[in-house]
Amino acid sequence: MEIFPAVQSQLVTVAYFSMEISLEPAIPTYSGGLGVLAGDTLRSAADLGVPIVAVTLLYRQGYFRQHLDASGNQTESPDLWNPEVLLEPLAPRVAVTLEGREVEVRAWRYLLRGLSEHPVLIYFLDTALPENSRWDQTLTDFLYGGDDHYRLCQEVILGFGGVAILKALGWEGKIIYHLNEGHSALLTLSLLERQIEGRGGEILQEADVEAIRKLCVFTTHTPVPAGHDQYSWEMAQHVLGAERSALLEATQSCFDNSLNMTYLALRFAHYINGVAMRHGQVSLGMFPRYPINAISNGVHAFTWTSLPFRNLYDRRIPEWRHDNFYLRYAVGIPLHEIQQAHAEAKRRLLAEVEKQTGARLPEDVMTVGFARRATLYKRLDLLFSDPERLKSISRNVGPLQIICGGKAHPRDDGGKEMIRHIFRAAQLLGDTVRVIYLENYDMALALILCAGVDLWLNTPHKPLEASGTSGMKAALNGVPSLSVLDGWWIEGHVEGITGWSIEEDDSSSEIASLYDKLERVILPQFYGRPLGFAEVMRSAISLNGSFFNTQRMVSQYLNNAYYPLRTAAND
Ligand SMILES: *Cc1c(COP(=O)(O)O)cnc(C)c1O
């Protein structure tokens, strides 16, 4: 029996569908920012008591564990974990049709508890059942593994299996479906089939599409073309079967002889949004025929605040835990208390570095950090464009050390080369600028790293960073950013107040600006005017920590995306 079926609630339930969700470090079913955002969204929804339920896939083999050799060559191994220990298997089974055969799907339940009485349930879909063929059993093994065909089959499981399992578990009545990225777009087809069920050969009406549109919210997350799943029409027909693909075709959401999950989601969502103001505009440029809004991302404030800062906020602004807006009043915290909390977070990071690598880094050296998925547009290695310049800055202005991390997708050769580039640069920099690359960047490491460095660096290729969230985690811990003006930083940046921007006309001036800011502005302030630097730290908390959190973000989804439907559906 489910804890709170929608029928008992006056409110419409939100069903949040995401290919990846990061709930805790022991559940490695996420690859990066998308999954972290999904987890943070659900954590804040749980805090706020929002009636929401989530669906994702189980991924028994996790994403992967990253191993790096002395030259920075990445190898991968499965990240096996124990669903049996962390989740509860549920009895109901549903069947999903794939390539004409039935695949059995079950769900495992995770119970997420926030600050409210109200727990949020997350269902992990699983096909590893003896009734299924060997191959079908592997369909919920790997996140972003396998080829296009494997991926499309997974998306059928997520979309069709997800809708079916919610029904089987008793989630009926009014449900708003939130598609976190296009991966789950096939759920719209499943809803459409229900809409026209028993109508015989009658042709699909625009009103049918409209009925589904009223139920769906779509958040698009990337302007990078490879981030939008697209399948050949032949493959779609083969996997979905003749009848389903005919219905899909009738919806007029497929173009260019392909099934594009983004177009499908755009066609069926009444509310569409990008994840930062600029990203909303960029998405509108990509998809001019659709009404695209923007709700800027956030992070779950409590999760991403290190222990020293949790203690400080508890003492000075105790309301911050249940109402993140109170972080605005961090402006009244004495600077030396910010400095003390940061020094403690930094010691924790340096202890972790020593534990993992044996390297002992000094506490009083300016420490620059960055870590994110190692994929080309993120330009993880931009800082190392000119190692001689870095050496000269470190010698002449003040010493500098660098701690970084990030996984490359197993098939992303460009990303893997980027990691090797950083290792080569580290060799060149020797003891003048120490560089530490930490293996296997994950949620747990992200918290230690974002909180423990003195400056968080972000150098994506503009305009490809939809939002970015790691700089928000840093801000909550009083760590200012030095970043390209893209994604959230366009909104969060006040020069010299919350951090610094890297100005850009072309890529060489970007690199020059990056070094200039370090050499002329940031390092001189860090070493010469530490109280001035601490003021920037405090403003990062007060201006950005108070806004770029998922508590504010979820309330914006309620007001702009879910709530208008709630009234309409209650009519
Ligand atoms: C927050 C987070 C990310 C996202 O970082 P971006 O700056 O948005 O690229 C990726 N991976 C992990 C493990 C994270 O915690």
Image (cartoon, grey):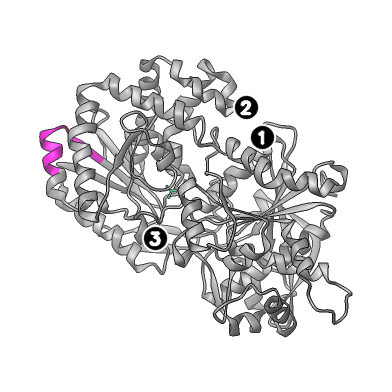
161, 211: nearer the viewer: 211
Q: Label 1 is placed on what type of residue? A: Asp
Secondary-structure class at tag 1: helix
The answer to whether residue 434 shows anywhere in this view is no
Crowd around label 1: few <14 · some 14–19 · many ≥20 (10 Å): many
The answer to whether residue 402 shows anywhere in this view is yes
439, 371: nearer the viewer: 371
Crowd around label 2: few <14 · some 14–19 · many ≥20 (10 Å): some
Vertical order, 33 against 491 (above or below):
below
Could you tell whether 434 is left or right of 13 in the image?
Answer: left
Residue drawn at point x = 11 percent, y = 36 percent = 395
Vertical order, 83 against 46 (above or below):
below
- Magenta stretch: residue 392 in it? yes
- Label 1 beta carbon less than 8 Å to ligand 1: no
Residue drawn at point x = 76 percent, y = 65 percent = 191
Q: Bounds of the magenta span?
A: 391-401
Residue drawn at point x = 45 percent, y = 38 percent = 472
Q: Which residue is mark 1?
A: 47
- Tell me, yes or no, whether the two marked residues, 1 and 2, touch with CB atoms within 8 Å: yes
Residue 393, by quadrant, is top left
- The numbered disc on residue 408 is 3
Secondary-structure class at tag 3: loop
Q: Position of residue 123 (x, y in %)?
A: 70, 54
Mark 1 against mark 3, which lies toward the viewer? 1
Residue drawn at point x = 14 percent, y = 32 percent = 397
Secondary-structure class at tag 2: loop
Q: Label 3 is placed on what type of residue? A: Ala
- The numbered disc on residue 322 is 2
Alpha-carbon span between mark 1 and mark 3 = 33 Å
First along the sequence among labels 1 and 2: 1
First along the sequence among labels 3 and 2: 2
First along the sequence among labels 1 and 3: 1
